[in-house]
Amino acid sequence: MDDQRQLFDLTGDYVAILDNQYRVEFMNLSGRILLGVSIDHDLNVEPLHIRQFHDDASWEELQQCILPRTLYEGAWSGIWQLRARSGEPIPVCLRALAHLDDQGQSTGLTLVCQDLRLQQAFQAQEAMVTRILDGTVEGIMVTDPHASIQRVNRAFTQITGYLPEEVKGRSPRFLRSNQHDRDFYDSLRSSLRQDGFWQGEMWCRRKSGEVSLQSVSISALRNDDGCVSHYVAIFHDLTDMRAWEAEIAQLAFVDPHTGMGNRYSLVQTLRHKLVRERLDRFPLALICVDLGQLSPINDRFGIKGGDELIRFQSQKLRQLEGPLQFFRLTGDEFVILVSDASDLTSLARFAVQCVQKLQVPNYLQGEQIRLSPSVGISLAPKDARDTDVLLACAQTAMNAAKQAGRDCYRFYDEGISHTMRQRLMLEQQLRLATQPEADLGLELYLQPKVTLPAGQIQGAEALLRWNHPEKGMIAPAEFIPLAEESRLILALDRWVFARTCRTVKRWRLLGLKMPRISINLSARHLQEPDLVNWCVETVMSCGLVPGDLELEITETAFVNLADMVLKQLVALRHAGFSLALDDFGAGYSSLTYLCRLPLDVVKIDRALVADLCQDERAAILLRGVVQLLDRLGFSVVAEGVETDQQADLLHAIGCTTGQGYLFYRPMPADDFIRVYQDYCIAIDF
């Protein structure tokens, strides 16, 4: 028995043995400590009764219910409360066992108790933590070191839609959206490893599939050994806050009637761009637009009608394309900010479009309303680098447009205004000149190609000249770039092609045998899907065959469009046209193109010919090029031959055909036919 009692002293539980009268015969060390009984207390000398460790109510229940039930059933267990000698109540988990003799009579009881104070304190603390966590508006998620979710709070469920039982044990990856790339998450994990902390904004996916913006902070918790035991993520839903911020910004920066930026937004945007942008490389343009005289409209239809008209006009402005930002400055005054205004011609063309858009009539209450807009343009940094000054310049230019009669635009710099108006007027006249049956000065010129060095005519190149009814002869260097910028080059190409075919047809009807005529095709024309069909149909309609013509393309036509151009050229060659590569050696030359393109003729650029007599290396280079082209089976034509020395050297290095002022300048088509007839007569003699 003593050995058994010594064993009881080793356990952490309270153990007591009672006799039939519920006197304590034995109490182990843990029990004495629990109830405040001295270790030296001799139970034989000073007996203790179990009644001494209960208050009246507990003792009554123990005596009347629990102990009899234990004696009857042999055992009982449950939560109970003892009282230490100091009077402190002690919650315990009680197990009572009855001692029975051979006749089944009770000889005593053994009581075993576990102290629940620590457990209950922990539970109370846990309950308090739960109340605190569930009382916060921030979502909280706790994971183990391997990112397996251990716990979430009520706000987590409210934010994400996931219940605790749906996420426990899972990795937080299910919350990821597609808004962040791998580098974002790699940086997050790196911060946690190095610093034990990460904070930032993160887009998360709710259970519903909706994506929401969260402000997230993640901390690593470490144990006494310095190892990570948990990760705690705290996040706050920013979706509503961002919506509120957007609403505030809408009120502060946006005009409520048009949805465009307001004056304050314009000033802030301009200040930012004038400071941050590289204006020398990418100049800005500020376009101030006055819709017209709205006062009569307001008088006739009221303020509501005026506002409706302003909305109509603002919608028209928004239809304009480009790097644009729109603002409403005052009642009938708008501002357009152009981020890249390096091309003044395009800017002027845009201003014309703006005026034309706003001139389109509107209808108010069934009545047609037409406004006369005025547009003013200022440039940064040319006119100003200051926000207020730049805006004032644009308004000054707009007022100048008003004084000019409205329905027009003006630059702040009157010199630019005059130049741009002239260019656009020229563009419009060129557009009209390309119309069928128009007689506005477009003329077909031809420049003969001759043998070297004899100068016998072998063919001719069709060229375009513009003899303007008022301005006289306009150089191709002036109107061809304008046509390319305004996309009129396609119309010019087709005008020259069709006019050449009709001219050759007319000559043949007169019984004249003509040499092959070459026609230039622009890079823009080569992008047209109907190019081949149109060329063939035009030739056939004039009673010609494709072989009567040679089509010239420049190297620039296929630098960026090689595959598309190659398909078009193959189709043209298959249709029977002869193909020539123009301006070879102008800066884009590649022998790869010569191998790929279905060419018949290569024309040496005038720049190589010009250096022929001044630079021995140029002569050596040109000799090698001519010999290479000859070995590849191409006919070679040298452009820009202007001196006898050049002609002799070209002939000496193997070039047999030339074109240039030494032989003939470009001439009207009728002059060419007279020259060619004289040449044919001279040969016959």
Image (cartoon, helix red, strand yellow):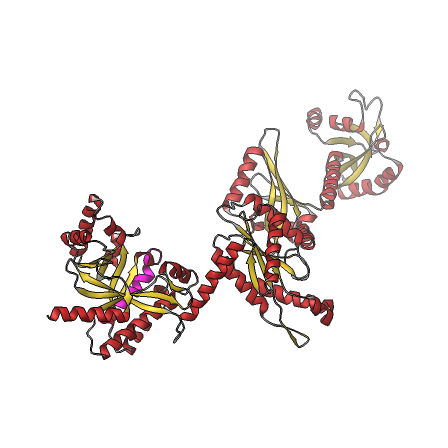
Residue drawn at x 52%, y 57% is 417
- As for residue 565 lying within the magenta part, the answer is yes
The outermost residue toward the top is 40
Q: In this view, does 183 lie to the left or right of 64?
A: left
User: What is the chief secondary structure element of the magenta stretch?
Assistant: helix
When asked about the image quadrant of residue 11, the answer is top right
The outermost residue toward the bottom is 509
Rendered view: 30 above or below 560: above
Q: Considering depth in this image, is 654 or 58 the residue closer to the camera?
A: 654
Residue drawn at x 17%, y 59% is 633
Q: Do we see residue 354 in this rendering?
A: yes
Rendered view: 389 above or below 575: above
Instruction: Point out residue 610 in the picture as x, y percentages from the top left corner.
Output: 25, 50
Q: Considering depth in this image, is 667 or 380 the residue closer to the camera?
A: 667
Q: Considering depth in this image, is 508 or 141 the residue closer to the camera?
A: 508
Residue drawn at x 30%, y 52% is 588
Q: In this view, does 443 lie to the left or right of 629?
A: right
Q: What span is colored magenta in the figure?
A: 558-572
- As for residue 335 lying within the magenta part, the answer is no
Quarter holding the N terminus is: top right
Query: How many numbered marks does the figure carry?
Result: 0
Instruction: Point out residue 194 in the picture as x, y percentages from the top left corner.
Output: 55, 33
When asked about the image quadrant of residue 406, the answer is bottom right
Q: Is residue 85 left or right of residue 615?
A: right
Q: Considering depth in this image, is 586 or 130 the residue closer to the camera?
A: 586
Quarter holding the C terminus is: bottom left
Instruction: Point out residue 326 in the picture as x, y percentages from the top left corner.
Output: 60, 57
Instruction: Point out residue 32 in the picture as x, y percentages from the top left corner.
Output: 78, 26
Residue drawn at x 70%, y 28% is 8
The outermost residue toward the left is 685
Q: Do we see residue 171 in this rendering?
A: no
